Amino acid sequence: MKALLVGADRLGNIPQVLTEYGISVMRHISGRDPSAQRADRSVPAGAELVIMFTDFLGHNVMRGYRDAARRQGLAVVACRRSTCSLRGALDACRLCRRPGAASAAGARTH
């Protein structure tokens, strides 16, 4: 599965965590650059998932990418920029669970 990542200046260990879930980074947009805040917030062709790091992202940028993803029928995962938060959000996403992982009771579906 290919994902558009929005938010965070640096990804650090996040690509390794995504690999555990069978997700590859198609594109990363920091969202802090003024040009990104004014740019067209379209999701690139071929993306199957949008992951937003909310602690490094403005509300308008987040809303724009979330709305663009939903118009294309893509799942949106929002979490803080930490590997623990990312794992929790991906485990809660029906489309993103690790192979062989047990489903969490009461998990939010996207």
Image (tube, rainbow, N blue to C red):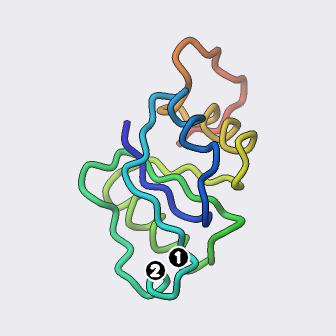
**Where, by quadrant of the figure, is residue 43 drawn?**
bottom left
Residue drawn at (64%, 35%) of the image = 92
Q: Is residue 65 left or right of residue 83?
A: left
Given the image, on which type of amino acid does mark 2 rest?
Ala
Quadrant (top left/top right/bottom left/bottom right) for the N terminus: top left
Q: Nearer the viewer, residue 33 or 40?
A: 33
Determine crowd level at label 2: few under 14, some 14-19, many 20+ residues with C-alpha closer than 10 A.
few
- Which residue is outermost to the left? 45
Determine crowd level at label 1: few under 14, some 14-19, many 20+ residues with C-alpha closer than 10 A.
many
Given the image, on which type of amino acid does mark 1 rest?
Val
Dot label at residue 23: none
Q: Are marks 2 and 1 in contact (CB under 8 Å)?
A: yes
Q: Nearer the viewer, residue 30 or 79?
A: 30
Residue 101 appears at what percent x and percent y?
61, 16
Residue drawn at (53%, 69%) of the image = 30
- Cα separation, mark 2 vs mark 1, equals 8 Å
Residue 83 appears at what percent x and percent y?
70, 42
Q: Determine the secondary structure under disc 2.
A: helix
Residue 75 appears at what percent x and percent y?
45, 47
Q: Read off the residue under disc 2.
A: 36
Q: Is residue 76 left or right of residue 24?
A: right
Vertical order, 89 against 27 (above or below): above
Vertical order, 94 against 83 (above or below): above
Vertical order, 9 against 17 (above or below): below
Q: Determine the secondary structure under disc 1.
A: helix
Q: How many marks?
A: 2
- Comparing labels 2 and 1, the label whose residue is closer to the camera: 2
Dot label at residue 61: 1
Residue drawn at (49%, 83%) of the image = 37
Residue drawn at (40%, 58%) of the image = 70
**Where, by quadrant of the figure, is residue 69 drawn?**
bottom left
